Image (spheres, rainbow, N blue to C red):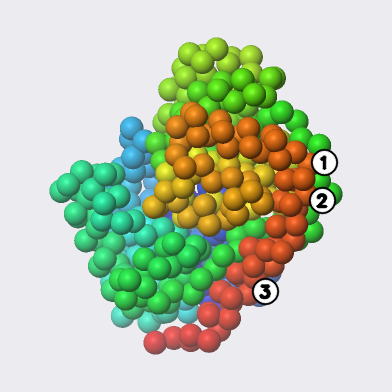
Amino acid sequence: MRICIVYDCVYPYTVGGAERWYRNLSARLVAEGHEVTYLTRRQWAVGHVPDLDGVAVVAVTPPLELYTRGRRRILPPLRFGLGVLGHLLRHGQRYDVVHTASFPYFSLLAAASARRVGRYRIVVDWHEVWSREYWRAYLGRIGGEIGWGIQRLCMRMPQSAFCFSRLHAERLREAGLEPVLLEGEYAGEAAAPAPRPAEPTIVFAGRHIPEKRVLALPAAIRRARREIPGLQGEIYGDGPEREKLLSAVAAEGLADAVSVPGFVDAEQVARAIREALCVVLPSSREGYGLVVVEAAAASTPAVVVAGPDNAAAELVDDGENGFVAPSASPADLADAIVSVHRGGEALRESTAAWFARNAERLSLETSLRTVVRVYAGEGRR
C-alpha cells in the first residue's frame, strides 16, 4: 500500500509521544514493504535530507515556531494545513491511505477537502479530545468556542478513527464517532528486568509547558526531602517554562540537588528511569503518558495526578505500579513520592508484575498490527 503520514513534527527533530508514534509507525510500515511518505514542516537545515528508515519525508512548510508563551500559535497550523492541501491536491492520487493526527486540525481539514481528488481513505489518530471547558481555559471564551467548533467539525469528517486511551475514546463516542482503541505505544522489550535497588532520585521527562506542570516539582522535591534525606531530582526536556523552572529550583535552594540538563539522548533518559526511585508526571492533560509505561518496563513506579483531562492516570493502578496524587500541590506530590519510597522493593516488584501482565496490551507491536489490519480491510472509497 501507499501511505501518507501527516504530522507537523517529526522525531528526532522534536521529541514527544506523537512524534515517536509516527516515526515507529512509518518504520514498521516500510519494513513490511509499504511505501510511506511523511508530510511535516521543515525542522532541519536547507539541503539536509532526513534519514527515516526508508520513509520519504516531505516538508510542506518552512520552519515555524509552534509555541508562544507556552501555547500553540495559530499561524503554523494554518500554514501547515495549506501545505498539506497543496500536496494532496497535486499528489493525493498516489496514496491509498492518508493517516493524520487530528490535531492541529487544519491538516485534517485539508486532507478531507482534497479527498475527492485523491480518492484515498482517511485514518485519524485522536491522541486527545479536549472538552469544551478545557478549550475555554486554553484560549478564552471566544477562542475556545472556535477551537471547540473546529474539533467538532473534524469529528464529522468521513474517517477511520484511532484513539489511545479510554478517556478520549469515550469522548469520541459521545460525539458520535466510534474509534478503534490502541493502547500500545511502548517499543521496548516485553520482559521487564529484575527489579534493582533504586537511587534516591525522581525523574521527569517531557516538554516544559504549562500542561506538564513541571514548575510543581521543585517545591514537591524540597518537601519530600523532609522524609527522604538526600532526595535528588533530574528534570529532562525543554520548553517555554525552562527559565521559570530554573528560577524555582534556585528559590527552593535545590541547585545542588536538582539537575535540569535539557534534552539529552534517549539512552541517558532510559538509564535515569531505570535507576530512579520513581518517575513523576504531574501533568494536568495527557493523551496517553508513554513515560509511565517506560518506567514500569524498568520496574520503576510512577506518580501521576488525577484530573478530568489526564489519561496517564489510566496507566497507574494505585499502590501497584505507582500512585495517583489527588492534585499537583507540593504536599500531594511529596506524599506520593514518599509513599513510593516507603513501598521499597515490594513496590518495584509489583511494578514489574504489573508490566508483565499488561506488556502485550501496551506494546507498540500490538497497535501496529491493528493499524495494518485496518488499512488492509478498509480499501479505498
Give the residue displayed 69% in from the left and 19% down from the top: 230
Percent coordinates x, y for residue 176 in the rendering:
32, 76
Give the residue displayed 36% in from the left and 36% down from the top: 70
Residue 197: name its quadrant: top right
Q: Amino acid at mark 1?
A: Arg
**Label 3–label 2 contact, CB within 8 A:** no
| Visible residue check, residue 132 | yes
Task: Determine the CA span between mark 3 and mark 2.
Answer: 29 Å
* Horizontal side, residue 184 vs residue 164: left or right: right
Q: Nearer the viewer, residue 131 or 61?
A: 131
User: Which badge, 3 or 2, is on the more N-terminal residue?
Assistant: 3
Closer to the eye: label 2 or 1: 1
Quarter holding the N terminus is bottom right
* Horizontal side, residue 14 vs residue 185: left or right: left
Number of marks in picture: 3
Q: Amino acid at mark 2?
A: Pro
Residue picked out by circle 1:
196
Closer to the eye: label 3 or 1: 1
**SS for tag 3?**
loop
Q: Nearer the viewer, residue 242 or 40?
A: 242
Task: Determine the CA span between mark 2 and mark 1.
Answer: 8 Å
Percent coordinates x, y for residue 355 in the rendering:
71, 57
Residue picked out by circle 3:
32
**Label 2–label 1 contact, CB within 8 A:** yes
